[in-house]
Image: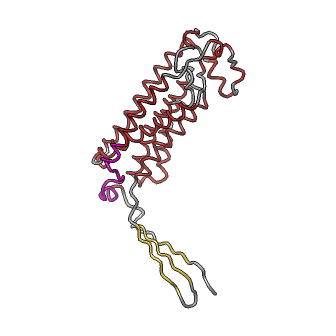
Amino acid sequence: MIAILVAIFSVSGLQLNGQEYYQKGSIYSINKKVELSLTLALFMSNYVGFQYLNKKDPLTVDEINALDANDIWWLDRIATQQDPDTRNKYHNASDVIMNVTIALPALLVVDKNIRKDWLDLLVLYMETHALNSSLYLGVSAFTNRIRPFVYHPDIAIEDKTISGTRESFFSGHTSTTATASFFMAKVYSDYHPELGNKKYWVFGAALIPPLVVGALRVKAMKHFPTDIASGIVVGAAMGILVPHLHKKKKNKNLSFIPVTGAVNGLLIHYTIR
């Protein structure tokens, strides 16, 4: 009888409590010189990108008159049916909540174990936002989805012919908000592995700010629901993936031991310390 592969996994040390884990140093591997240079380069390119977006040709009167809200998917059509008299109020409210959420990760320094790595985390946070903005600009540069308010008959034509009416997809406000809230949730969870499955409550809470901002952007007639959903997905992905890809790997020991006798094969011994 021949066993082609016999794998035995011996796992030790997985139930480290928070303090024991922190004593091993920062859980993220960050090269400040390289990553700061990358982040600054991204912010500079993003500045140029926003200048490009501002120069997109505005809609003509004929293009506006040819629009019909009935041509929009029913789920998105609701964004064209909001009260135009309150759209500026909701727009301003979305700005406030987005900016507050961007500042929220600063609360992580309250945790003494996270506070010791504040500079690494600041660099990582800036890089995450720079990457999110770059992705937003890349998509916005090649899409021309018209904002919902342009479809409303009671909004003055002067407001519809300004620049910036072709950047509905995807929502930069919700993407930026989700980047901040999910970055905070990811970092906190990484520093507290003892949370176990309870970390999903943390990520659930991280979903609240972008959902609120998204609802306000729809009320402001700036974005369609699908723009909001796409922005949340992109922002959440950036907030989670960038820290995750910088996370240090735990010490591992992998050995291969030939086995002969009654059973011939290969013993794989895998240890996580």
In the image, taking residue 222 as reference, residue 35 lies left or right, namely: left
What residue appears at the point 62 percent right and 12 percent down from the top-left corner? 61
Q: Is residue 14 above or below residue 148?
A: below
Residue 79 x/y as whole percent? 62, 22
Residue 67 x/y as whole percent? 68, 18
Residue 229 x/y as whole percent? 58, 34
The N terminus lies in quadrant: bottom right
Residue 146 x/y as whole percent? 60, 23
What residue appears at the point 33 percent right and 47 percent down from the top-left corner? 34
Colour convention of the picture:
secondary structure
The C terminus lies in quadrant: bottom left
Q: Nearer the viewer, residue 132 or 110?
A: 132
What residue appears at the point 40 percent right and 51 percent down from the top-left corner? 246
Q: Nearer the viewer, residue 118 or 37?
A: 37
Q: Nearer the viewer, residue 3 or 163?
A: 163
Q: Nearer the viewer, residue 181 or 51?
A: 51
- The residue range painted magenta reads 19-37
Indicate the quadrant where residue 194 lies.
bottom left
Q: How many marks?
A: 0
What residue appears at the point 30 percent right and 56 percent down from the top-left corner? 25
Q: Is residue 77 above or below residue 138?
A: above
Residue 36 magenta:
yes
Q: Is residue 207 above or below residue 150?
A: below
Residue 108 magenta:
no
